[in-house]
Amino acid sequence: MSDLEIPSKTPPMLETRQVCKQYQSGTTTLEVLRGVDFTLKEGGFLAVVGQSGSGKSTLLHVMGLLDAPDSGEVWINGRRIDNLPVREKDRLRNSSIGMVFQAYHLLPELTALENVLAPLLIRYGIFDWFTQRRAAQEKAKALLDRFGLSDRLHHRPRQLSGGEMQRVAIARALITDPQVLLADEPTGNLDEESGAGIIEALAELNRDKGLSIVLVTHDADIASQAGGIVRLAAGTVDIMNSGAADSAA
Amino acid sequence: MADNSIGDMYKLLLCWRYLRTRWIALASVISVTLGVATMIVVNSVMAGFSHEMQTRIHGILSDIVFESHSLSGFQDPQWHIEEIERAAGDQIAGMTPTVAVPAMLSFQVRGQWVTRQVMFIGIDPRTHAQVSDFGQYLQHPTNREQLSFSLREGGYDTTDSQSPTETPTRPALEHAGWPHRRMRVERERLWKERLETKKSAENTTTRSVDQQVHDVLAATSPKDDSAETSSDVTEDGESRKNPFQTARPAQGRAMDPAKEQFTGIVPGIGLASFRNRQGVDQFLTLPGDDVKITFPTAGTPPKAVSDNFTIVDFYESKMSEYDSNFVFVPIDALQRMRGMIDPQTGIPSVNSIQIRLKPDAKLNEVRDRLREVFPSDLYAIATWRDKQGPLLSAVDMEMAVLNILLFLIIAVAGFGILAIFFMIVVEKTRDIGILKALGATSSGIAGIFLGYGLFLGLLGAGAGLVLGLSITYNINQIRLVVEWCTGSRVFDPSIYYFFQIPTIIDPVTIGWIIIGAIVIATGSSVLPAVRAARLHAVEALRHE
């Protein structure tokens, strides 16, 4: 486990310490996470794999501050974040964490461009927006262009294919220049070819921009393209192989 | 820095998008619109009616009425007027004494005697117009400038001088005055002659009575001119010299009704006419006709006395209560006939003093000042508002109840918005989860729905304002269209005495209606907004 030790100078980008989470449904208590220790180095690309119900998504939600752990700690870039006030968590989600979901989760009323701009629309007030608008739109267009969507700027989500929607979603996650990107089965709803394109795009982001990525998947092939693999089983980390992530970092 | 700013740009964008894509929400806007429009129209019309009524009441009554409790009145009005002047003279613009007694008015219609119960009011023709709008309610243009109780040589309005429309609704008044009187006298004379000739079995004429009257009038036309000049004298302020003015024919000499008149009276138009369904007034009697009035004397116990009078004009205040009740007569004639003049000192008594205040005077303050000076067991001092208090408060009450009922319409619209918004929150659960995942705060999410409600309220109230104002401005045209479509009269002038539906648009009232509608629309979106804000991000994202 020596490669997981934290170098004293640079703290890990994302870290969970003994995170526990349980759900109460009626009289039965479901323990989803039972003390998960997880570390992602800066610039790392880890795939989290495991069977359905092993707690992959819950772990990702806890790391993405969408859900609070019952116990344990979540650290980002050397700062504990699970106990921050609600407002501060909202702000972190808006600025430091990018999220991509299996079902794309685009807003149907907005165009592709507006969906990409959504995090900035949430961040800025009306007056700030009018001062930032031009730069933000340029940035969003550049991102969409990079994902080959420059002719889809003003299309609504329902006019786009699955692969296109997921690329819009990734662009939206990147518009805020997040410190870490959390992807929850981003290829789950896509055919093999589109899925491969998405994974390729993520790998490229990791390689070229040094973006730290956590990718949740149940597909071993996809997981193998990541720098390292963490296997979750019964709510704990079963295997943690982040050798490749080391080399990437 | 961005982390200190309150992000609200997305709320604006999403509200706008929801407004454009959720037509069902616009349905609830329609009920807000209709509620606001109805409230504006009803309030404007009610305010118009109320104002019209108050103006008329105020025009008829003077500002403050100073009355004695007894029917015999109080002595020496001049002393009272001076005392009132001393108490509150700085705020008083004019005063006039009056005598009012209940009486019976009898007049002949086609040989039948018609008797009506009336209020017989003695007024000073020179000062009465100073304390109320009495003058403008008369039918002869010259009388409107300065009332005279002498019969005019024709020239009465055949149209309603207070109505903006020029259609003649009173053709009967064309011949009113001396021509009518002469024709009547001539007709009676010929009728008498014909009866006599019939009796003597010599039917010398086959011509109709009307033709004969016409011939006689043509032959006596020079007399018309002299009669005219004699009545014109009144306009030079020489009215007292007019031999017909309030003069009773000399005792013992038979009066010539074609040249002389009895004491002039001005009855309310409702006593002498009725309006038919076509809006044309049918007259039972006209200026120039003689009537009998029976009234009590001032003694104890009062004795009923009768006298003959000649109608010289009609009074039309458009308040049917007054128009079918009041008969005006010169005050000195009434005082003399009732025995209200002290035979030794010659000092008259009056029932009341009508007081008109200066425009900026304080009504209740003057009343209270007078009440301090004059004992309340002898004198009743009341403002015109006090006198019509029950009527005015009934109208206010009516308006308040109507407003509550109509506001409930908007409240119902609010519940519609509540239900629709709950539906939209359920439908948009996943989107709410997305927004939270992207960093939107709970208050921001609530803000979207509150803003949406505010938008709907503004839209509904704005549309209601436009609709309501355009209906109010065009209500009389709309009435005509409705009457044309249905064939029945929506607004019958024979009932209301107004020719147009009066409206007053009060910006303050409209402001409150608009604010109320917006508050209700925004208020009904509070519960759905709170519900949306409380949604758990992960659960919302899983929602299908």
Image: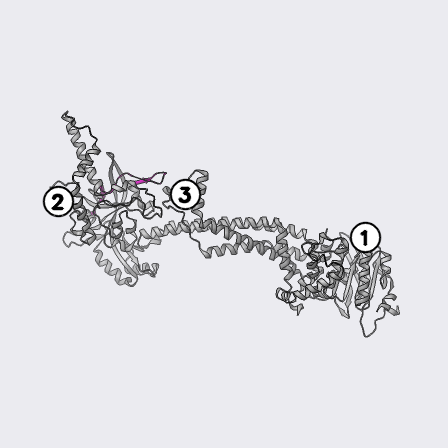
Tell me which chain the residue with mark 3 is part of.
Answer: B
Same chain shared by disc 3 and disc 2: yes
Residue B302 falls left or right of residue A65: left
Q: Nearer the viewer, residue B357 or B493?
A: B493
User: The N terminus of chain B appears in which quarter of the rendering?
Assistant: bottom right
Q: Which residue is tagged 3?
A: B491
Work out how far the residue at label 3 is from the one at label 2, CA to CA, in angstroms.
Answer: 51 Å
Work out how far the residue at label 2 is from the one at label 1, CA to CA, in angstroms.
Answer: 124 Å
Q: Which residue is tagged 1?
A: A191
Tag 2 secondary structure: loop
Estimate the x, y position of residue B93 in percent, counting from the top left.
Answer: 28, 60
Q: Residues within 10 Å of mark 1 (few under 14, many from 20)?
A: few
Tell me which chain the residue with mark 1 is part of.
Answer: A
For marks 2 and 1, give the one nearer the viewer.
1
Q: What amino acid is at disc 1?
A: Asp
Quarter of the view holding residue B195? top left
Q: Is residue A36 magenta?
A: no
Residue B101 falls left or right of residue A59: left
For marks 3 and 2, give the one nearer the viewer.
3
Estimate the x, y position of residue B353 in percent, counting from the top left.
Answer: 26, 54
Tag 3 secondary structure: loop
Q: Residues within 10 Å of mark 3 (few under 14, many from 20)?
A: some
Residue B375 falls left or right of residue B466: left
Estimate the x, y position of residue A171 in percent, counting from the top left.
Answer: 74, 61
Q: How is the image coloured?
A: one colour
